[in-house]
Image: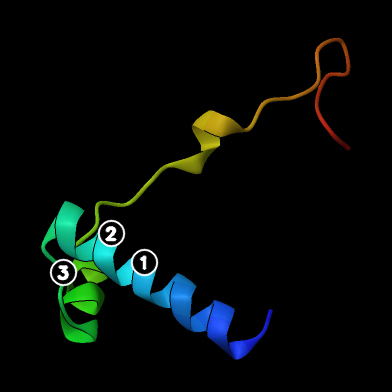
C-alpha cells in the first residue's frame, strides 16, 4: 500500500468516525476506546462437536 492509498483510507476512517460517532480528534477516539464496555469473547469460543475438551 503506497502512502497515497494509506492517506485515503485514513481520511475515509476519519469521516466514518465523525459521522457515526461524533469523534473528531485522536483524543476523543482514545476517550471513546477507554469508555467502551468490556466484551466477553468466550461467547464466540466453542469446542468442536464430538471432540470434548482440548487437552
Residue in the picture at 38% in, 46% down: 39
Q: Nearer the viewer, mark 3 or mark 2?
A: 2
Q: Earlier in the sequence, mark 3 or mark 2?
A: 2
Q: Position of residue 21 (x, y in %)?
A: 16, 57
Residue 41: x %, y % from top left? 50, 41
- Residue drawn where x is 24% and y is 84% of the image: 26
The answer to whether 34 appears left or right of 11 in the picture is left
Residue 13: give its label: 1
Q: Quadrant of the N terminus?
A: bottom right
Q: Residue 16 has which mark?
A: 2
Report the number of numbered marks.
3
At label 1, counting other C-alpha atoms closer than 10 Å, the crowd grade (few under 14, some 14-19, many 20 or more) is few
3 or 1: mark nearer the eye: 1
Query: For numbered disc 3, what is the local secondary structure?
Result: loop
User: Picture quarter containing residue 49?
Assistant: top right
- What color scheme is it? rainbow
**Label 3, on which residue?**
23
Amino acid at each position: 500500500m503506497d502512502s497515497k492509498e494509506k492517506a485515503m483510507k485514513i481520511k475515509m476512517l476519519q469521516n466514518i468516525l465523525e459521522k457515526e460517532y461524533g469523534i473528531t480528534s485522536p483524543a476523543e477516539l482514545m476517550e471513546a476506546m477507554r469508555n467502551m464496555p468490556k466484551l466477553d469473547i468466550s461467547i464466540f469460543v466453542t469446542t468442536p462437536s464430538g471432540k470434548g475438551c482440548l487437552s
